[in-house]
Image (cartoon, rainbow, N blue to C red):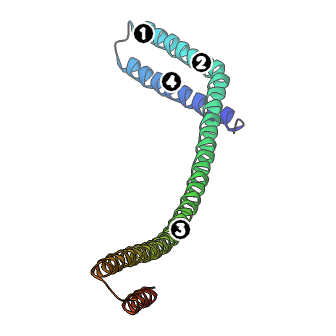
Amino acid sequence: MRRNLPSKGRLWLGGVVTVGLLLCGAHLAGAAEGAHGDGGALLKDFLYRCLNFALLAGLLGYFLRKPLGDALAARRQAVATTLEESRQAREEAEARAERLARQLEAGGREIEALRLQMEEETAKERAQLLEQARQTAAAIREEAHRHATRQIERARRRLQAEAATLAIQLAERQLAEGLTADDQRRLVDDTLRQLGEQQ
């Protein structure tokens, strides 16, 4: 690309010189038609100015060609570097976006798996709690049955003791009233038989 700069610089310099020469020719033509006395002085002045302009343009073109070409090449390189960096940044951003999309998808699957696992664990805990409640209720019923059986047994013993006490009191009273030996024996047998039946 730098090889094109000297040819462009030459074209530019050629264009400046051509324009200068055209201006000089136009001024000369105007001077020839003008007044005869001071036309020569004006022509000389104009030619010096054209020559100064051409030299200045040529010198500027010669000295500015390399720095201007280097600046343009540096600018072109900077633009190319910026474009390459932006392309790389775009590719990195696309790769990062794709990575994040995969991570989000994987995260969604993990969340769904955790939700299903939590539902299973909750169902298992509920079943365990229901089984424990059933076992506790059965244990409470059994304990209540045993307690009721013990209470009934105590009441039966108390009733038997009261019956025995009443029988003894009745026997004592009848003895006091004068029972015969057969009556006493019969009373004792009846009492013992009753006690046996209650047991």
Separation (CA) of disc 4 from disc 3: 96 Å
Instruction: Mark yes or no: residue 10 visible.
Output: no
Number of other residues with Cα within 10 Å of mark 1, as a class: few under 14, some 14 to 19, many 20 or more: some
Which disc, if any, is residue 2? none
Q: Between disc 4 and disc 3, whose residue precedes?
A: 4
Residue at which label 4 appears: 20
Q: Quadrant of the N terminus?
A: top right
**Marker count (numbered):** 4
Number of other residues with Cα within 10 Å of mark 4, as a class: few under 14, some 14 to 19, many 20 or more: some
Which disc, if any, is residue 42? 1
Mark 4 or 2, which is nearer the eye? 2
Disc 4, disc 2: CB below 8 Å? no
Residue that appears at 58% across and 60% down:
102
Residue at which label 3 appears: 121
Element type at mark 2: helix
Number of other residues with Cα within 10 Å of mark 3, as a class: few under 14, some 14 to 19, many 20 or more: few
Instruction: Mark yes or no: residue 116 visible.
Output: yes
> Which is nearer the eye, 58 or 47?
58
Q: Between disc 4 and disc 2, whose residue precedes?
A: 4
Residue 178 figure quarter: bottom left
Mark 1 or 2, which is nearer the eye? 2
Separation (CA) of disc 1 from disc 2: 27 Å
- Residue furthest left as drawn: 177
Separation (CA) of disc 1 from disc 4: 17 Å
Q: Between disc 1 and disc 4, whose residue precedes?
A: 4
What's the residue type where badge 4 is placed?
Gly
Figure check: 154 above or below 45: below
Separation (CA) of disc 2 from disc 3: 87 Å
Residue 111 placement, left or right of 153 = right
Number of other residues with Cα within 10 Å of mark 2, as a class: few under 14, some 14 to 19, many 20 or more: few
Which disc, if any, is residue 60? 2
